[in-house]
Amino acid sequence: MNIPNTSKKRVVIIGGGFAGIALAKKLKNKNLQVVLLDKHNYHTFQPLLYQVATGGLEAGSIAYPIRKVIQGCHDFYFRLTTVKEIDTQNQKVISEIGDLHYDYLVIATGSKTNYFGNKEIERHSMSMKTIPQSLNIRSLILENFEQAVLTKDETEKKALMNFVLVGGGPTGVELAGALAEMKKAIFQKDYPDLDIQKMEIHLIQSGDRILNTMTEKSSEASEKFLNSLGVKIWKNVRVTNYDGRTISTNSNLSLESATVIWTAGVQGACVHGLPAESVIDKVARIRVNAYNQVKGFENIFAIGDIASMESEAYPQGHPMMAQPAIQQGELLGDNLMKLAEGQLMQAFEYNDKGSMATIGRNLAVVDLPKYHFNGVFAWFVWMFVHLFSLIGFKNKAVVFLNWVYNYIRFDREGRLIIRPYKKKSFTTFTSDEI
C-alpha cells in the first residue's frame, strides 16, 4: 500500500461512511498514524439518495471527496481499495492492493441491503444504498416511461408505469412520496401522450404500520400524507417472490411491475476474518462492548451500522442510522487517544436526538425526545437538519439552491438518463410494437 513505516501506533479505518469520517476528523493531527480505506474515494450522504434517484438532486451534491476531508492532516493516508479479509492473528488487513499491519483496527463498513436469502428478489429488484444504485433507479424509471410511450400493449404499458416499493421505513416512505410528486407535477408534462393517471405507486409493508420505528402519531400522519398523494399502501403483506415481472405475496395481492425497489431491510456489510462468535449471523452485525471493542479483541473496534452494542435499552443494538454512527465515531476518536496513552476509556451512551422523514412538499413527520409534530413546520425542520448535516459549503449551497428552485418551479431537472440501465429480465418488446 506504500504506507511509510512509523514508530507511532497505526490506526486502520475500514470505511468512509458517517462513522468512519467522524472518527477520521477526531484523529486529525494526533500522535497516531491513521490509514483510511474505502472502495470509493468519496463520502455519501445516504439520507438524500432518494432525491438523486428521483431527479431532485445530482449525485455530486451529496458526495464529498474523502481526500479533501483529510487534507492538511499529518501522517494521515487514504487508499482506494476493497478489503478482502482481516488477519487477526498477524494483525493485518488484506486488500486488493496489498496487506497492511495495524495496531488498532476500526471496522466502519456500514450496511447493505438485506434480501433475507431470497435470490430471485435480489436478482430482479433494485436497491438504494449507494450513488451508483440511485443513478440506476433514476435511469430505469425514466427508461420505463420512454418504453411505455412506444409500446401498444396496454398490459405491458401498465407494468412499466407501476412502481412497487417494498418496505415502509423512512427510505420507502420518502421514495414513495417523491415518485407521487413526480406523477403529479412532472410526468404529465413530460409525457403528454401517456395517461399518467394510470401510473401506480405501491408501498408494501410487512408490519401493521409504516415508519414503525417512529411514534404512532408520526406513522399515522405519514400514512395520511401518502394517501393524499395517491400512494397505495399495503400493510401486513410480505413479498415472497419477484421474477422481474410479477410480485408474489403471502396474501391475495399480486402485482405486475417492471420496477421493484427493495427497502425492506438492511444487514451489516461484514468483513471476512472475524471469528463466528463475534458476528451475529442473522443480521451480519459485529458484537461489541460498551467501548465499541469487538468481542474477543482489545485492539479491534467496530462502529456505526456494522456494530451491535446490545444493552437493556437497545437489546438488538442501536438503530442503523447516521446519529449512532457519528456519535460512536467521535467517542472512539477520544478513546483511541486514551488507550494509546494508557488511560481508561469512556463507555458509549447514545444521545437520541430524534428521527424524521419527509413525505413530500410541505409534508414531513418529526419525532424529537419531547416533541412530535408533522406538516409544514416539520418539513422545514427536516430540510434544515439535512442541509446542515451535509459535508462541505458547496454541497450545502447547491442542495439549498436546488430545493428552492424545485419548490418555486415544482420541478426536478435532474431527470437525465446519464448512465442507461437495462433490466435484461424485462425486455419483451418486439419490433412490431415499437
Image: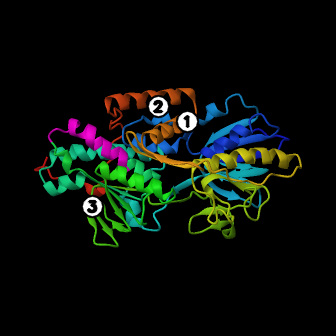
Earlier in the chain: of badge 2 and badge 3, it is 3
Label 3 secondary element: loop
The residue identified by callout 3 is: 245
**Nearer the observer, 408 or 201:** 408
How far apart marks 3 and 1 lie (CA) works out to 37 Å
Is residue 217 in sight in this rendering?
A: yes
Q: Which residues are magenta?
A: 176-193
**Nearer the observer, 339 or 411:** 411
Image point (69%, 64%), residue name: 311
Relative to residue 408, is residue 60 drawn left or right?
A: right
Label 2 secondary element: helix
Q: Residue furthest right?
A: 342
**Amino acid identity at mark 1:** Leu
**Number of on-image labels:** 3
Which of discs 3 and 1 lies nearer the camera? The answer is 1
The residue identified by callout 1 is: 390
Earlier in the chain: of badge 3 and badge 1, it is 3
Check residue 399 in the rendering and tell me which mark sits there, or answer none. Answer: 2
**Amino acid identity at mark 2:** Val
Earlier in the chain: of badge 1 and badge 2, it is 1
Determine crowd level at label 2: few under 14, some 14-19, many 20+ residues with C-alpha closer than 10 A: many
Query: For residue 191: magenta?
Result: yes
